[in-house]
Image: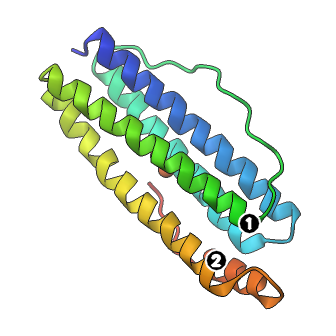
Amino acid sequence: MLSKKIEKALNDQIASENYASHYYLSMASWCDKNGLHGCAGFLYSHADQERTHMMKLFHYVNDAGAHARVTAFKESPETFKSLLDVFKLVLKNERLVSAQINRLVDICLSESDYSTFNFLQWYVAEQHEEELQFTRILDLIKITGLEGRGLFLVDKEIGAMPKKTN
Ligand SMILES: [Fe+2]
Ligand SMILES: [Fe+2]
């Protein structure tokens, strides 16, 4: 049984994973339109991954006897200043998601909901991994630069990164 407070916090997390999925899909589309097909492929796959995160939460909430909800969320921007800007925005969003997950874990502990606490450990580890991945991408962009062949190399490198399915 989930408390109302935890149900609400999990539904907020569902909305935020859903937003991340749409946000990254919009970035993928911008990359595609700008000839950055490696980055587009990477971000399409990342958008799918965020949807998987959302669905895991969705099923958890319903299986626990509460009600998973589909709520409206803000629209994603359609254009971006540069590839550097895209990945800076991804990292910024991931840091927000990490903070949100941490708050959720805090609530579970304060309510002694160890089942949800245990379920959320996967998200804690996932956020660590994602923040690291996007920090590395920004490092790559910093080292390679985006001038001349730099943009081509960065796109190729990011396109070759392994794509996770969850
Ligand atoms: Fe996620
Ligand atoms: Fe994420």
118 above or below 155? above
149 versus 48 height, above or below? below
Report which residue position mark 2 lands on: 141
From the viewer's perspective, is residue 90 above or below residue 70? Answer: below
Residue displayed at 31% across by 30% down: 104
Residue at coordinates 46% horizontally, 41% vertically from top-left? 97
- Choose top left, top right, bottom left or bottom right for residue 82: bottom right
User: Contact (CB < 8 A) between labels 2 and 1?
Assistant: yes
Q: Quadrant of the N terminus?
A: top left
130 versus 153 height, above or below = above
Residue 128 location (% of width, % of height): 35, 57
Is residue 43 in sight in this rendering?
A: yes
Question: Residue at the top extreme?
Answer: 4
**Most foreground residue, 1 or 114:** 114
Q: Can you give x and y, in whole percent of width and height, for residue 147 in the image?
A: 80, 83
The answer to which of marks 2 and 1 sits earlier in the sequence is 1
Residue type, label 2: Ile
- Look at the numbered disc 2 and give the secondary structure of its residue: helix
Count neighbours of disc 1 (C-alpha within 10 A) and say few if under 14, some if 14 to 19, many if 20 or more.
many
* Neighbours of disc 2 within 10 Å: few (<14), some (14-19), many (20+): many
Colour convention: rainbow
Report which residue position mark 1 lands on.
83
Relative placement, left or right, of 101 versus 46 is left
| Secondary structure category for the residue under label 1 | helix
Left or right of residue 1, residue 87 in this image:
right
